């Protein structure tokens, strides 16, 4: 199992918007050609990024632009904008452990704290990386 690709698609999208801001109109078709997905996927991501206040999208084929500076957007911000994971809910717990089993009846309590710590560690790591850090990997 993997976490969805929405975070990586959204980060890629924002990187394209910033990298090409003075070179090309960053339309959904243009972004999709870089990301390697259908433009419909990009349009959904763009709506989520717009709702989060990260971008403006011009009507028609005007393209997208960043509303915030790249150093003001963290990977955690992007993750929260597109992945819709509630606090403490990254890991989905299986629905029906056997309440009559000594393991099944206590597995939730045994794992919950560890899973919450793992989610918090991941979120702390994502919060320490900005879009500027990502963009620093590309030469102009």
Image: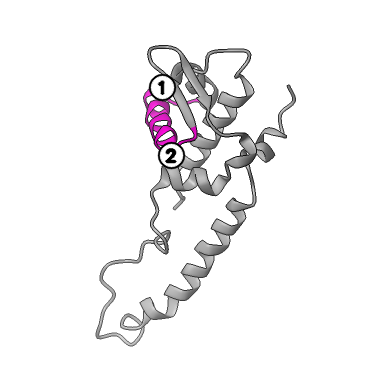
> Which one is in front, 63 or 99?
63
In the rendered image, the vertical position of residue 58 relative to residue 123, given as above or below: above
Q: Is residue 1 magenta?
A: no
Q: Residue at x 32, y 66 (%)?
A: 94
Give percent across and percent down for residue 99: 25, 82
Give percent across and percent down for residue 75: 56, 45
Q: Which residue is mark 2?
A: 52
In the rendered image, the vertical position of residue 134 relative to residue 114, given as above or below: above
Find the distance from the CA under tag 1 to the CA under tag 2: 20 Å
Q: Are marks 1 and 2 in contact (CB under 8 Å)?
A: no
Lateral position of residue 127 relative to residue 1, left or right = right
Q: Quadrant of residue 87?
A: bottom left
Q: Label 1's element? A: helix
- Give the residues drawn in magenta, as a range: 36-54
Give percent across and percent down for residue 56: 46, 26
Q: Residue at x 37, y 76 (%)?
A: 108
Residue density around tag 2, few if under 14, some if 14–19, many if 20 or more, within 10 Å: some
In the rendered image, the vertical position of residue 59 relative to residue 122, given as above or below: above
Give percent across and percent down for residue 97: 29, 75
Q: Residue at x 41, y 24 (%)?
A: 38
* Residue closest to the far right: 139
Q: Which residue is mark 1?
A: 39
Of the two numbered discs 1 and 2 on the same chain, state the one appearing first in sequence.
1
Q: Is residue 37 magenta?
A: yes
């Amino acid at each position: 199992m993997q976490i969805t690709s929405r975070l990586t698609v959204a980060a890629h999208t924002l990187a394209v918007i910033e990298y090409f801001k003075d070179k090309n109109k960053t339309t959904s078709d243009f972004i999709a050609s870089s990301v390697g997905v259908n433009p419909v996927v990009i349009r959904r991501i763009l709506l989520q990024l717009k709702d989060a206040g990260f971008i403006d999208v011009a009507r028609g084929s005007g393209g997208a632009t960043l509303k915030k500076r790249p150093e003001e957007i963290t990977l955690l911000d992007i993750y929260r904008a597109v992945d819709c994971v509630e606090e403490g809910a990254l890991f989905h717990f299986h629905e029906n452990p056997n309440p009559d089993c000594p393991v099944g009846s206590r597995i939730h309590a045994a794992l919950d704290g560890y899973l919450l710590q793992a989610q918090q560690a991941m979120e702390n790591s994502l919060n320490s990386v900005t879009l500027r850090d990502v963009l620093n990997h590309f030469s102009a």
